[in-house]
Image: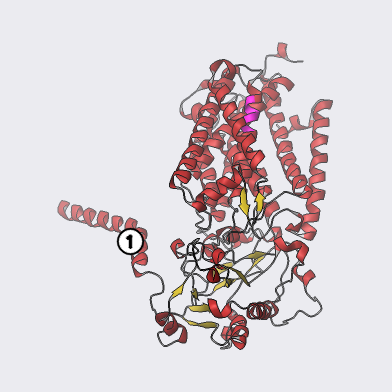
């Protein structure tokens, strides 16, 4: 199957070349971080996690979203997802890879990372997070590769694969739940210490992940003769709609609880995000425009998704999906992580702004994800186009 | 035979219920016995006299003694956000936000209070560390830190409710005389690791008082008291029973072992 990766049009190779160049720039930027330490980032004593961990949190959700296609197809025999399911599994693989790279980029001593396995610590959520991420990567690689290979050979996948398919369902839920527990288990951070965090993470994941899958489907339809199917895209857009509405509802629950109870420590991070905090005569509000933009964009996207005529409009749908992704990235990636540190336990406010190096490393890591995704999707397209009737072949 | 089997099943199910309930029960017992009950084991603790320690010369001397002893890098002012500090001062209202009400006497409100790692009974930082690079030492209750195992994930910094931990964003050796660190008996460390107060574990082993306590008491006698809070014969035990003291963030349940006398 790998041969498909090495056979492609000029456009394909140009795209691969572009990604490699971006990756190269990211590696170059990372070399400064490796030499000088995390001082090259915008993080500080008070805001000790930043852009990298925010991307990690968001991308775990994208990885988990494969389950929204796997459940209907394998558990409910929903045939329309037949062509889509492999795309979902092969989206999960680069998504998990990107998560791991963001964690690695965030480490102060990356060469000591194997200490996590050398000194396994079950009471640490980070230990569990590593375990479930590796597991999820393995499951999706096994299921994706074997089922595609069987399809190529024209045989049914082996029975034992069902075990991994079923396992992938709770496992997908677990990766994002455990990621939420990283935050929700900290008594020092009232903003994160809320039981709704895991459900909120899952809802936003099931909106953002399928949104990305829809956009990828449109791209695949455009660049190849393989069509994941109109019905599959339509059903997936319904999933996005429900999940997005749930997410907005969950955020509303959080805001009600915090502001009706009127407890300062719980309100301050929200006020920081949406209004800015006054402290010793200075105003700290650098997240405000991003948060409002994200929330308004998210609500507008949700409204257009709820209205059937706009949701079913295939010209509009990719943009709605893009809006959902951007809104959730701002809410859960940026806002959720950064506001947890404000104010600090000693009630100081230190604002965080990512540096150019941080941005370059981030883009580089996403490019590695995009490259992996391109390679995997090239294989899918190669196998699928090969299966088309010869009259349709070029 | 059926009877005995039924009996066995009954006992087994009761036993398994008991096992399932264990975490709940033990949590309950822990809550009832509370924080600071006397036991045989050692738990080092410290009392800070807020009035006596509200003294810039004293606080500076305590910090200098600590930071020299442990080769704590002096991060330059332009990187103030990345400061490394094991012991320092904060305004009363920042240290005790739950106590600092709006009509509080100004002389207390603006006092500078010495803060450091609380060496908690149930430390959040230890709970979250993925490599056991920080742990609660069983023999004397010190929350230890292995800077040579730490991977620099900074989970402990997010988890600590006291802001007691610092991260080496840069190479700490850049900020000290690498040829001859201030204290050749204490290790320097590489960049990318977290560090914090160790209650001077090395000094305690030699029967000495922590560096900050020694320095502070040399300026104002009785400014700090250090000892085993579990030993009814110790000076600190008597001090705590005779004086009204506070700990930071009591409601979070971490069980701090640094006490404050107002």
Picture residue at 49% right of the left edge, 33% below the top = A246
Chain letter, disc 1 residue: B
Q: Which residue is mark 1?
A: B25
Picture residue at 49% right of the left edge, 63% below the top = B103
Q: Does residue B77 appear left or right of residue A58 in this picture?
A: right
Q: For numbered disc 1, what is the local secondary structure?
A: helix
Q: In this orientation, does residue A156 appear?
A: no
Seen in the picture, residue B11 relative to B83 is either above or below; the reply is above
Seen in the picture, residue B198 relative to A264 is either above or below; the reply is below
Q: B215 or A241, which is in the foreground?
A: B215
User: At which x and y percent is residue B64?
Assistant: 68, 79
Tell me how many marks there are: 1
Is A360 colored magenta in this rendering?
Answer: no
Seen in the picture, residue A73 relative to A294 is either above or below; the reply is above
Seen in the picture, residue B92 relative to A113 is either above or below; the reply is below
- In the picture as drawn, the residue positioned furthest to the top comes out as A391
Q: A46 or A286, which is in the foreground?
A: A286
User: At which x and y percent is residue A243?
Assistant: 52, 31
> Residue A14, located in which quarter of the rendered image?
top right
Range drawn in magenta = A320-325
* The N terminus of chain B, quarter of image: bottom left
Q: Does residue A218 appear left or right of residue A356 in this picture?
A: left
Q: In this orientation, does residue B76 appear?
A: yes
> Residue B24, located in which quarter of the rendered image?
bottom left
User: At which x and y percent is residue B96?
Assistant: 51, 65
Q: B114 or B182, which is in the foreground?
A: B114
Q: How busy is the neighbourhood of tag 1: few (under 14 within 10 Å), some, or many (20 plus)?
A: few
């Amino acid at each position: 199957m790998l041969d498909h990766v090495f056979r492609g049009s000029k456009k394909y190779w140009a795209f691969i070349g572009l990604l490699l160049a971006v990756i190269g720039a990211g590696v170059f930027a990372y070399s400064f971080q490796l030499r000088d330490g995390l001082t090259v980032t915008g993080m500080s004593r008070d805001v000790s996690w930043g852009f990298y961990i925010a991307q990690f949190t968001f991308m775990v959700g994208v990885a988990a979203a494969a389950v929204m296609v796997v459940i209907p197809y394998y558990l409910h025999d929903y045939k329309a997802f037949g062509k889509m399911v492999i795309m979902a599994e092969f989206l999960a693989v680069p998504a998990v890879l990107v998560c791991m790279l963001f964690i690695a980029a965030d480490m102060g001593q990356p060469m000591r990372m194997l200490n996590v396995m050398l000194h396994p610590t079950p009471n640490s959520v980070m230990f569990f997070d590593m375990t479930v991420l590796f597991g999820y990567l393995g499951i999706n690689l096994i299921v994706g590769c074997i089922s595609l290979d069987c399809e190529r050979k024209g045989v049914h996948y082996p029975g034992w694969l069902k075990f991994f398919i079923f396992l992938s369902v709770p496992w997908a839920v677990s990766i994002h739940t455990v990621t939420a527990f990283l935050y929700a288990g900290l008594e020092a951070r009232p903003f994160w210490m809320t039981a709704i965090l895991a459900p909120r993470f899952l809802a936003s994941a099931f909106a953002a992940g399928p949104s990305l899958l829809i956009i990828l489907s449109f791209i695949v339809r455009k660049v190849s003769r393989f069509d994941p199917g109109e019905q599959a895209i339509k059903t997936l857009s319904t999933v996005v709609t429900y999940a997005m509405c749930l997410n907005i509802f969950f955020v509303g629950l959080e805001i009600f609880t915090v502001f009706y109870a009127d407890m300062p420590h719980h309100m301050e991070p929200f006020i920081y995000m949406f209004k800015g905090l006054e402290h010793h005569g200075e105003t700290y509000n650098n997240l405000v425009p991003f948060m409002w933009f994200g929330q308004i964009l998210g609500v507008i996207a949700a409204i257009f998704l709820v209205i059937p005529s706009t949701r079913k409009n295939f010209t509009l749908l990719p943009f709605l999906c893009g809006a959902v992704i951007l809104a959730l990235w701002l809410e859960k990636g940026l806002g959720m992580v950064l506001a947890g540190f404000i104010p600090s336990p000693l009630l100081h406010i230190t604002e965080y702004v990512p540096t150019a190096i941080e941005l370059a490393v981030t883009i580089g890591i996403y490019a590695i994800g995009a490259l992996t995704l391109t390679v995997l999707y090239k294989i899918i397209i190669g196998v699928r186009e090969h299966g088309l009737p010869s009259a349709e072949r070029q | 035979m059926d009877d005995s089997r039924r009996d066995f099943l009954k006992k087994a199910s009761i036993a398994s219920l008991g096992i399932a309930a264990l975490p709940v029960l033990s949590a309950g017992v822990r809550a009832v016995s509370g924080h600071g009950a006397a036991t045989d084991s050692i738990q080092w603790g410290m009392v800070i006299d807020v009035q006596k320690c509200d003294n810039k010369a004293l606080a500076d001397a305590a910090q200098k003694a600590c930071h020299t002893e442990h080769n704590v890098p002096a991060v330059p002012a332009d990187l103030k956000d990345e400061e490394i500090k094991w012991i320092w001062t904060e305004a009363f209202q920042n240290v005790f936000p739950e106590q600092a009400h709006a009509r509080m006497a100004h002389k207390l409100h603006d006092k500078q209070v010495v803060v450091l790692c609380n060496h908690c009974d149930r430390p959040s930082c230890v709970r979250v560390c993925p490599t056991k690079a920080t742990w609660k030492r069983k023999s004397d209750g010190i929350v230890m830190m292995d800077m040579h195992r730490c991977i620099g994930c900074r989970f402990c910094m997010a988890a600590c409710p006291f802001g007691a931990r610092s991260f080496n964003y840069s190479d700490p050796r850049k900020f000290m005389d690498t040829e001859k660190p201030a204290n050749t008996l204490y290790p320097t460390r590489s960049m990318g690791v977290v560090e914090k107060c160790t209650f001077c574990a090395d000094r305690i082993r030699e029967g000495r008082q922590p560096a900050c306590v020694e320095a502070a008491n040399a300026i104002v006698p009785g400014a700090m008291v250090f000892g085993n809070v579990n030993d009814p014969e110790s000076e600190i035990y008597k001090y705590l029973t005779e004086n009204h003291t506070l700990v930071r963030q009591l409601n979070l349940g971490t069980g701090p072992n640094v006490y404050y006398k107002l």
